[in-house]
Image (cartoon, rainbow, N blue to C red):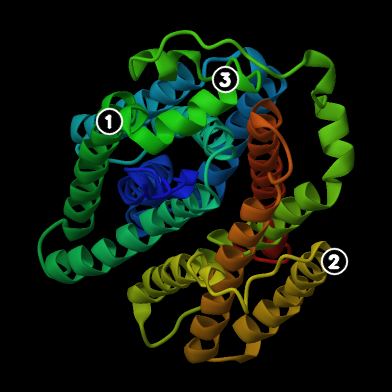
Amino acid sequence: MGVAEVVTPDRLPGKRIAVLVCWFLGMGSLLSWNTMLTVGDYYYKVFPKYHPSRVLTLVYQPFAVGTLAYLAYNESRIDTRWRNIAGYILFFVSTFGCLLLDLATSGHGGVGPYVGICILVAAFGVADAHVQGGMCGDLAFMLPEFIQSFFVGLAASGALTSCLRLVTKAVFDKSHDGLRKGALLFLAISTALELACVFLYAFYFPKLPIVKYFRTKAAKEGSKTVTSDLAAAGIKQIEENAKVEDRFTLKQLLYQNWDYFLDLYLIYALTLSIFPGFLFENTGEHKLGDWYAVVLIAMYNVLDLIGRYTPLIKCVKLDSRKGLMIAILARFLFVPAFYFTAKYGDQGWMIMLTSLLGFTNGHLTVCVMTVAPKGYKGPEQNAMGNLLVLFLLGGIFSGVCLDWLWLIGNASF
């Protein structure tokens, strides 16, 4: 009689499909917002005096951070399934709202339409807090490949929208009202993909065998956030094995992992102090003309995507806590580098710098996210996922505020 083969969790059926689904759900988590950023040249034409790239980002972030702070504090009592479904539905509704608003106003500017866009962008922030924190908390107690794939999907949304923007700009460049046609096409595509994410997460993802395995395991360890997911997969209530006194509090998790939280905060504070506002408004005029900002945004997004795959190469992945902190602090050299390049350098140097900014952002983000949640049980890993995203969004908010400092001394301000 042969010896039965031991099936490890990562060899359960559905792993590759789950990785692909996580990628698609990650793309849907930022697709709407990246669409707004990528069509920034259109909004600068419609609202030339309102600093769209800076103002819309500043509107987005307080709602994202504030909502996620509340959700992270109460994560153990919030059903992850309905939280994520609500987030994807809100993405769909608000993206569709942007499309309808532009059609209703025929692409005209003014305070009224701009306020309407700001309200819809605020809804993006609320949706982002639901989805990113919820998905990261959910995937934190599964395989590291899942959370990496999710974050690759986040970057893929930017790369996809940037590449499509280059194509549509080339196609509609000579046509009447070409910028608006490209923007409307983007919003329509984003609306359809957000709706697909709703159905994919609600009806397909929870039924994958490997996903059911990890959620069942988390339930046995005391997680209450997976109850609806298990019910949707046809699994009855599971009795938990973990004792309440064995669990870590949010305060303990913050104390034990403060450097990981600081890592993510600093990564995004630096990145968003440069991207996208500086690239749109502070890089001057060059041979590429109105293509320049679009190319810079595209290069950032493509290299950010590539950087999120490179941690798969073990020799370049940073696992050391001290090494991560040193690398992240070294990125602040980008500030003087971008300043002097914008003042004295040509467009080639700026494109190279922007590419490096994107690559390091993606690589270091995935390194932190795949290392940090290890060594905890299901409930704590879910809490860690929420806290990591909270500090990530906090860094983005700080970076957005710091980005306005580039306008000091600018006459157009």
- State yes or no: discs 2 and 1 in contact (Cβ < 8 Å): no
> Marks 3 and 1: which is nearer the front?
3
Circle 3 sits on which residue?
Answer: 219
At numbered mark 2, what does the secondary structure look like: helix, strand or loop? helix
On screen, residue 184 versus residue 176, left or right, reads right
Looking at numbered disc 1 in the image, what kind of residue is underneath it?
Tyr
Looking at numbered disc 3 in the image, what kind of residue is underneath it?
Ala
Vertical placement of 314 versus 265: above or below? Answer: below
- Residue sitting at the far left: 175
* Residue at the image position 34 percent from the left and 30 percent from the top: 201
Camera-side residue of 36 and 311: 311
On screen, residue 6 versus residue 386, left or right, reads left
At numbered mark 3, what does the secondary structure look like: helix, strand or loop? helix
> Marks 2 and 3: which is nearer the front?
3
Q: Which mark is residue 204?
A: 1
- Residue sitting at the far front: 1
The answer to which of marks 2 and 1 sits earlier in the sequence is: 1
Looking at numbered disc 2 in the image, what kind of residue is underneath it?
Lys
Q: Does any portion of residue 18 appear in the rendered image?
A: yes
Residue 230: quadrant of the picture: top left
Give the spatial CA distance, label 2 vs label 1: 40 Å
The answer to which of marks 3 and 1 sits earlier in the sequence is: 1
Local crowd at mark 1 within 10 Å, few (<14), some, or many (≥20)? some
Query: How far across and how far down the image is residue 295, in percent?
Result: 38, 74
Query: How far across and how far down the image is residue 240, in percent?
Result: 63, 14
- State yes or no: discs 3 and 1 in contact (Cβ < 8 Å): no
Give the spatial CA distance, label 2 vs label 3: 34 Å
* Residue at the image position 60 percent from the left and 42 percent from the top: 58
- Quarter of the picture containing the C terminus is bottom right
Vertical placement of 13 versus 359: above or below? Answer: above
Circle 2 sits on which residue?
Answer: 322
Camera-side residue of 384 and 305: 384
